[in-house]
Amino acid sequence: EAGVAQSPRYKIIEKRQSVAFWCNPISGHATLYWYQQILGQGPKLLIQFQNNGVVDDSQLPKDRFSAERLKGVDSTLKIQPAKLEDSAVYLCASSFRFSGSSQFFGPGTRLTVL
Amino acid sequence: AQRVTQPEKLLSVFKGAPVELKCNYSYSGSPELFWYVQYSRQRLQLLLRHISRESIKGFTADLNKGETSFHLKKPFAQEEDSAMYYCALRVTQGGSEKLVFGKGTKLTVNP
């Protein structure tokens, strides 16, 4: 079984620029999560999708971050414009169903904002 | 508010020694706890969950609701156990379910 795929693996941009991350979850997994992991901290949930609908985006900075999951499979997370404090690893995870399933993580995208 | 605390940022032991990684939580609901591990250059992966009550790679963890703890233990540490360990709490609120992670403990097992 292929794992969660993410791209790019690394991205360096200057502040005020835009950036997008892509995630392909494990086939058949209905729930998809985006986490932000700042250096020295644990992952923090940004947004959660159930199929193509948003379940929880309470911790997503909506003035600059957006995410979509068209067709309930792949997902894209965008930051526009980026700030220095957005430097972090962005993790995508998926689980088979909404409740009670284990989450499987992708390798992450390391973003550096200069 | 829900919170997971891992008091040790770094933990260093010698091979063959016992190891205990501490985790405390704060949650008003019925807790479900997990330990995730990240080996060098690998992705975050589930190590064990308290409801399974199983031993993975020699590690065990018991949920103590009285002390609100879920410490990870292994009687004899191996060099390959060196990794980042994260304790996580599954939280249900407002119809959604999410994981709240601690800040992690970096375990180093010395030869």
Image: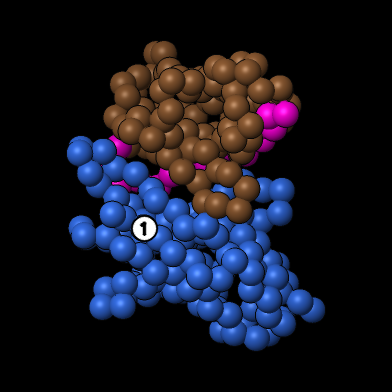
Badge 1 density bin: few <14, some 14–19, many ≥20, Cα 10 Å = some
Decide if residue B66 is on the left or right side of residue B60.
left
Whole-percent x and y of residue A78? 53, 19
According to the picture, the residue beneath numbered tag 1 turns out to be B3
Q: Is residue B51 magenta?
A: no
Toward which corner of the image does residue A58 lie, by quadrant?
Answer: top left
Q: How is the image coloured?
A: by chain
Toward which corner of the image does residue B80 lie, by quadrant?
Answer: bottom right
Decide if residue B7 is on the left or right side of residue B50.
right
Q: Which residues are magenta?
A: A98-114
Chain B drawing hue:
blue
Three-letter amino acid code of the residue under disc 1: Arg
Q: Residue at x 66, y 56 (%)?
A: B39
Identify the image quadrant of the C terminus of chain A: top right
Q: Is residue B12 above or below residue A75?
A: below
Front-most of B31 and A114?
A: A114
Front-most of A7 and B9?
A: B9
Identify the image quadrant of the N terminus of chain A: top right
Q: Residue furthest right?
A: B111
Q: Is residue A69 above or below residue B14?
A: above
Whole-percent x and y of residue A107? 62, 39
Front-most of A79 and A32?
A: A79
The brown-coloured chain is labelled A
